[in-house]
Every structure is written in structure tokens, then in C-alpha cells.
């Protein structure tokens, strides 16, 4: 499917309750809610860019896996699961069990997707960058990083995308 399909709905959903960022490595899977990200074209490729703070358990997965998926529910009601996956860490609870989330295998990457969402992106990490305080404006630094918990930005080539 064309990666731009449903992009307006996806971007709006990211700005509301968010979407699921899921990654798998070493046989373990974790998911967390993301609200920041972008879909576009870089290096002549369709790219989904996501931002993961250093403190997230998901960071460990992103560093080791090489791929991730983004599952976006814009018509189905997954508000409760997004709220839990956006406040609890997979270090402490099994989010899939607690939120009753079912996984479907990725079609093109090892990381699975969350069943029941509307739009899915399967991404291969082709670049990453740790944010640097000195490259940020003071305004963004003080508003978004008061405790120095900076993001790593992951650039995922969209190798597959599809509706439910
Ligand atoms: C609506 C919403 C959007 C969020 N967006 C992000 C994000 O883009 N990047 C990020 O690092 N954390 C984001 N978070 C916070 C993580 O989802 C949260 O810290 C989560 O518990 C991390 O889980 P983990 O430790 O299992 O990785 C968001 C939380 C919510 C509720």
C-alpha cells in the first residue's frame, strides 16, 4: 500500500492518544505509546521517524533489534491500552497481558504488530541519532527536557504498510 494512505488520520492520532511502537529482539517483545513522530521521505525512501527517550525500556529493544513497527488505532477505541502502555514500563509489567493486547507477526520484519489497529507500518532502522543539548534551542530544551532525558531519533525505512 502507498505509505501516504491515511497519513492525515495517523498524524492526528499521534497528537491525540498516540500509537503503539513495538519492537522485538532476542525473543522478547515490548510496546510503548508514542505521540511524536513523522512520516516522510529521506534518502529517496519512505521513512517513519520515532523518538525514544533514554529512560525507556523500549530503548533497549530499539538498540538491539534493528526493526520496529508502528500500529495506529484511529477508529477503534484503544484509549485505555494506549494510556497504560504510555505510563507503565515493560520492565515492571507484561503490558500485553494487562491490556489484553494480541500480537500479529510482522509481515516483513521480525517485530510484531498490535491486533485491532487501523494502520500498520513495518520499519527497518536505517539511521539513528542521539539528541544533543547544545544543538537544541533553549526553548525546546527547557520545555521538553527539564531533567535531561533526551531522545534518540530512529529513522525507520517503511518496508511494509497496510490497513487492518
Ligand atoms: C500519549 C503519549 C505519548 C507518548 N509519546 C512518547 C514518545 O514519543 N517518546 C517517548 O520516549 N515516550 C513517549 N511516551 C511515554 C512512554 O510511552 C512511557 O514512558 C512508557 O511507559 C515507556 O514504556 P517502556 O519503559 O516499556 O518502554 C508517551 C506517553 C503517552 C501517554
Image (cartoon, helix red, strand yellow):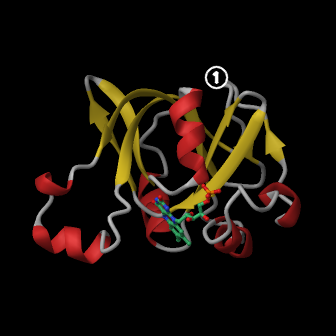
The location of residue 161, given as percent across then percent down, is 56, 35
Q: Quadrant of the N terminus?
A: top right
Residue sitting at the far front: 147
Identify the residue shown where x is 67% and y is 51%.
31
* Image: 61 above or below 117: above
Decide which of 128, 18 is in the foreground and name it.
128
Local packing at callout 1 (Cα closer than 10 Å; few below 14, some 14-19, many 20+) is some
Identify the residue shown where x is 34% and y is 57%.
150
Decide which of 23, 134 is in the foreground and name it.
134
Identify the residue shown where x is 45% and y is 52%.
54
The location of residue 155, given as percent across then percent down, is 38, 36
* Image: 5 above or below 14: above
Find disc 1 in the rendering and name its residue.
108
Identify the residue shown where x is 73% and y is 75%.
80
**Is residue 146 rendered to the left or right of residue 77?**
left
The location of residue 3, given as percent across then percent down, is 45, 37
Q: Secondary structure at mark 1?
A: loop
Ligand 1 quadrant in view: bottom right
Decide which of 1, 65 is in the foreground and name it.
65
**Is residue 90 rendered to the left or right of residue 101?**
left
Q: Is residue 109 visible?
A: yes
Decide which of 78, 83 is in the foreground and name it.
83
**Is residue 36 rendered to the left or right of residue 23?**
left
Q: Is residue 121 visible?
A: no
Which quadrant of the figure has residue 27? top right
Report whether the residue tagged 1 is closer than 8 Å to ligand 1.
no
The location of residue 136, given as percent across then percent down, is 15, 58
Amino acid at each position: 500500500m502507498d505509505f501516504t494512505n491515511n497519513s492525515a488520520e495517523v498524524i492526528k492520532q499521534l497528537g491525540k492518544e498516540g500509537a503503539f511502537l513495538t519492537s522485538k529482539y532476542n525473543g522478547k517483545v515490548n510496546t510503548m505509546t508514542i505521540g511524536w513522530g513523522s512520516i516522510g521521505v529521506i534518502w529517496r525512501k519512505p521513512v517513519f521517524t520515532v523518538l525514544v527517550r533514554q529512560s525507556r525500556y523500549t530503548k533497549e529493544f530499539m538498540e538491539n533489534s534493528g526493526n520496529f513497527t508502528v500500529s495506529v488505532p484511529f477508529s477503534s477505541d484503544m484509549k485505555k491500552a494506549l494510556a497504560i502502555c504510555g505510563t507503565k514500563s515493560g520492565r515492571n509489567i507484561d503490558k500485553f497481558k494487562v491490556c489484553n493486547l494480541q500480537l500479529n507477526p510482522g509481515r516483513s520484519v521480525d517485530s510484531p504488530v498490535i491486533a485491532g489497529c487501523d494502520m500498520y507500518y513495518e520499519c527497518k532502522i536505517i539511521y539513528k541519532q542521539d539528541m544533543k543539548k547544545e544543538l537544541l534551542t533553549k526553548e525546546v530544551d527547557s520545555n521538553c527536557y527539564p531533567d535531561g532525558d533526551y531522545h534518540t531519533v530512529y529513522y525507520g525505512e517503511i518496508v511494509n504498510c497496510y490497513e487492518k
